[in-house]
Amino acid sequence: MFTEESSHQRQMEGLRLKHVNLELWQNLEDHNTQGLSSSQLVLRRGRPFKITLLFENRQFNPHTDSLFFKASLGGLYIEFPAVLSKDSFHTEWGALIQSGDVYPLSVTVHFTTSSRSPVGLYSLQLHILSWNQQHDYIIGKFVLLCNPWCQSDSVYIPFEDQREEYVKNDFGLLYMGTPHNVISQPWAFGQYEKGILEICLNILQVSPQHSRDRQRDYLHRSDPVYLSRVVCAMINCEDDRGVLRGNWSGSYRGGVDPSEWTGSADILKRWAKTRFSPVEYGQCWVFAAVMCTVMRVLGVPSRVVTNFNSAHDTNSNLIIEEFYTDTGEKLYVSKDSIWNFHVWVECWMTRPDLGSEFSGWQVLDPTPQERSRGIFCCGPCPVKAIRKRRVDLAYDTPFVYAEVNADVLTVIVANGRVVSRSVDTERVGTRIYTKSIGSLKPENLTCAYKCAHDIARLQSTSSRRRKSLDISLSIDKVPVVGEDISVSVTITNKSSVTRFLREHINAQAKDFNNIHLKTFWELRNHLQIVPWEVKTIQHRIPHSQYEGELMADNLVNLAVVIEDERTQERVLASEELNITTPQISFQFAGGDRLVRNKEHSVLVTFTNPFTTPMCNALLTVEGFGLIEGKAQSKVYLLQAGKTVDKTITFTPTSAGTKMLQASLVSKNSSAIIRSFHAVSVTTE
């Protein structure tokens, strides 16, 4: 009798919660968020997840007990009951109860979230109502991200290989150099490194938009257009407590030379460690790569894109002016410029604000160049709008259009006056590259940005006034450091008279954004050319003349001016090249196929190709998932032609394709020598 009464009394008790199982590993696997956090529940919106509740005093009774949930993001919240039937289950936020199979005092609750939910860190509360008794519990927190696997999400991208490359891949390649000699630089996006998820969420919390109006900011985080624009502005620090400070001066005292960065994680961790003070320093590829990391963490498909011969059109007239002296020396006198390469980000999303025809890849550029609606950011600008020349559309379409399509007006000046003008419609936006899906090769995106109207515009140049002298300049072979530069100048006399000509040829070391120029070699020559003759002149620039003169990008601007001594007609041809740096080689003991949690070793080798010794060099080897931290060793003196090697032992911690990087920085050289090697890590 006592037992029966106790059992009845227990049924009359209010239901109390004892333990919550967030089903962490199962949910992370179901939501493709493995590795983003080892302790936090990370979910993608629009995808069901489950939580198991263990009660303390008795079983859940659906006739007497009710469960209500409240999901909160800042001051925003949504409340919903847990139901027993799928018929009453919601397609937005909702909860479905399933009785526990193993533990009779437990129930498993299956949740759904809206595919239009804001991104952020949520708190989940449980309210239990039974026998007129109430109990409230905070049962946990979870991070909700965009979901490119969900068809109703505005960042849905249709193919799995795209999601693997543009969301889950934690390494990539950045393309630099010139169109004739494209350099691949490895980059570790680092989204799976400890703490990166939390730092990326803090970027949203620190933003001016959040400080001004938290409720509005939380509400608008459902929209990737808004989200990407906030992040774009926060990557630079011009208007806010952003991540990176730009520096193009060539002097990086007090900070890090942008060329020395190899991944996003170090930068993001420094920013967080200094209580959100800007990290010094960044340039375009650093800004873009860090933004790509943040957007991938937030669940937005993203890729880093390089535009070769990228125009910066400051006055929006679609014309870039370049000035040369009559001896072929390039002058830095115009606010407009052409960068050998410029790097930005593309993010994939729908554009309901512009119409479905402009959905897909959007250009976002966090490098602070021009203000957009009062802040230093650029985009999201639809790639399709650039191709269709819809420069009336938001955001920043005219600026991006000019970057890939502006004309180049080349002006020769002598004694303070203009002596020649010419227009080139083909130079800007020569190639547009990103890393191919599942490959280390570049994918050419130029046709995605340029359409038939651009081709017609290029062909219209044939109507220009024809000149009686035609010249071209070419590089016979892109040299490696330590080799001479071989140059050919070809002159065509398109007239019926013999011409007496003066040749002026000039070589300048330069940086990629065309700000710093330094002449290191020049030559003058007199020649004669008969009617209709085609004459080629060979020049050789000794490597001893450029060694020690080059800037960090190893770029050289070559220009030749041919002047008719009788008519003073002048014609200019120019070309830019980047001298290839030597390679660091990798040799793995037992081959490139590695096994997780098994010890391996690699021999890293470098031979000094310079004519002078390398002093106080630092060799750094790193690779997330392969080597913990960075393996560094000092090379105090490496004579010309001598070799240094270093054997590194390591144990891979994760499976998949991994990137091993090595860099060598010398105190007496501006060049940073960098190489990489991709390896496959298996589980057994």
Image: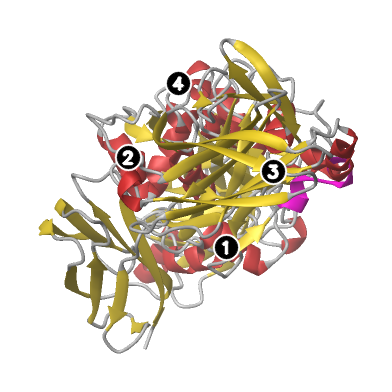
Q: Earlier in the sequence, mark 3 or mark 4?
A: 4
The kind of residue on which mark 2 rests is Glu
Q: Is residue 673 above or below residue 2?
A: above
Instruction: Please name the residue shown 70% across and 66% down the image.
Output: 159
Q: CA distance from mark 4 to mark 2?
A: 32 Å
- SS of the residue under disc 2: loop
The kind of residue on which mark 3 rests is Ile
Circle nearer the viewer, 4 or 2: 2
| Residue highlighted by disc 1 | 165
Circle nearer the viewer, 3 or 2: 3
| Residue highlighted by disc 4 | 238
Could you tell whether 582 is left or right of 381 in the image?
A: left
Could you tell whether 336 is left or right of 407 in the image?
A: left
- The magenta segment is 446-454
Q: CA distance from mark 4 to mark 1?
A: 31 Å
Q: CA distance from mark 3 to mark 2?
A: 35 Å
Residue 178 inside the magenta-drawn segment: no
Q: Earlier in the sequence, mark 3 or mark 2?
A: 3
Q: Position of residue 435 (x, y in %)?
A: 57, 59
Q: Give the mark count.
A: 4
Instruction: Please name the residue shown 57% across and 24% down the image.
Output: 326
